[in-house]
Amino acid sequence: MPHMSTKLVHTIVQQHGVVTKAQFADDGFDRNTLTRMLDAGRIVMVHRGVYRITTSPETFESRCAAACLADPTVVVTGASAARLWEFRHVFRPNTPELLVPHHANPISKGVTVRRTNVLINEDVVQRPDGIRVASPARAWFDCATHLEDERFEMLTEHVLDQHCQMPTLWRTVRRLHSRGRPGLARVRRVLSQRSDWQRPADSGLELRVLKALQKAGVPELVRQHPIRLPSNLTIHADGALPDIKWGVEVDHVTWHGGRFAAQNDKARDRACRSIGWLIERVTDQALADDFKGEIASVVEMYHLRVAESRPSVA
């Protein structure tokens, strides 16, 4: 039985333990040899013409690679693509979700298939490991089918922060516009509530806080409101009520907190007070410990600020 070349071993490792019949043939393995390897349990067939080396564990990535190697028309999309891109706020599926053209006759074993009549090169990223994955913008759009509005809004902020800009998302929406397309209404609702100039929220936590404050009776806060400091530096509060010069900031101490960050925040807050602004800060740790209590405290500070802002009666 022939031994695998160093080149083939490298290819198999790169492809998460998956290899095609054609790749075996290029390395000198004929059909009879593959049959003996199957009988001996050295390889298992995943799809027709695609095998996995049994010493390599079956993983989500290996299933995606096997599907793409078995069928050149498929692209991993939706929540599956979100997992490959490491999107936040999306559930992690174990079964690859594949996007294929309407005319294709794709594989069906161990995968979920979705058909489309709109799939261009811009939508597809070819990875070195053999996986064809939907671009971040296309994966984001396809995730709208699976998520409710609030979680999709959080996902949108994450994608804007890590992968795309608003023009790219809007271009994707316009291209995929068609009546009855799953998720389209949700995409429009979420994007229409967002101004193009807004920088993305660092996480979905800011959105949760702002929505919780509004639910508790605080007027809708302006997101990323610019505040120009005496030093000519412009900062952007996570949420603000410009009429009463009151804002809210969510600090991620568990991500990037530290002595210098805290000093900078205090200096900025002092500068805000010097021009009449009051900034309330809450931390991700405090919110994790007692979300309702922290929100109630901020609401109380809002009411105090409103009282302070009322003109005094002589």
Image: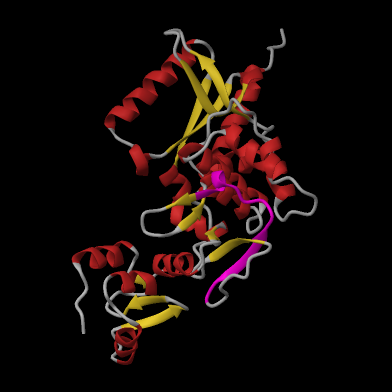
Question: Residue 16 at x, y = what percent?
Answer: 34, 66
- Residue at 68% from the left image edge and 42% from the top image edge: 175
Residue farthest to the bottom, as pictured: 39
Asked if the stretch drawn in magenta spans residue 120, the answer is yes
Taking depth in this image into account, of 166 and 62 the one nearest to the observer is 62
- Residue at 54% from the left image edge and 33% from the top image edge: 165
Residue 99's place in the image compared with 222, above or below, is below
- Residue at 74% from the left image edge and 48% from the top image edge: 185
Asked if the stretch drawn in magenta spans residue 170, the answer is no
Left or right: residue 48 versus residue 38 is right
For residue 51, what is the image quadrant? bottom left
Question: Residue 146 at x, y = what percent?
Answer: 63, 59
Q: How many marks?
A: 0
For residue 3, what is the image quadrant? bottom left
Question: Residue 230 at x, y = what percent?
Answer: 45, 7
Quarter of the figure that contains the C terminus: top right
Taking depth in this image into account, of 2 and 265 the one nearest to the observer is 2
Taking depth in this image into account, of 118 and 89 the one nearest to the observer is 118
Residue 259's place in the image compared with 48, above or below, is above
Residue farthest to the right, as pictured: 179
User: Can residue 216 be seen from the camera position used here?
Assistant: no
Span shown in magenta: 110-124
Quarter of the figure that contains the N terminus: bottom left
Question: Residue 161 at x, y = what percent?
Answer: 48, 37
User: Can residue 272 be seen from the camera position used here?
Assistant: yes
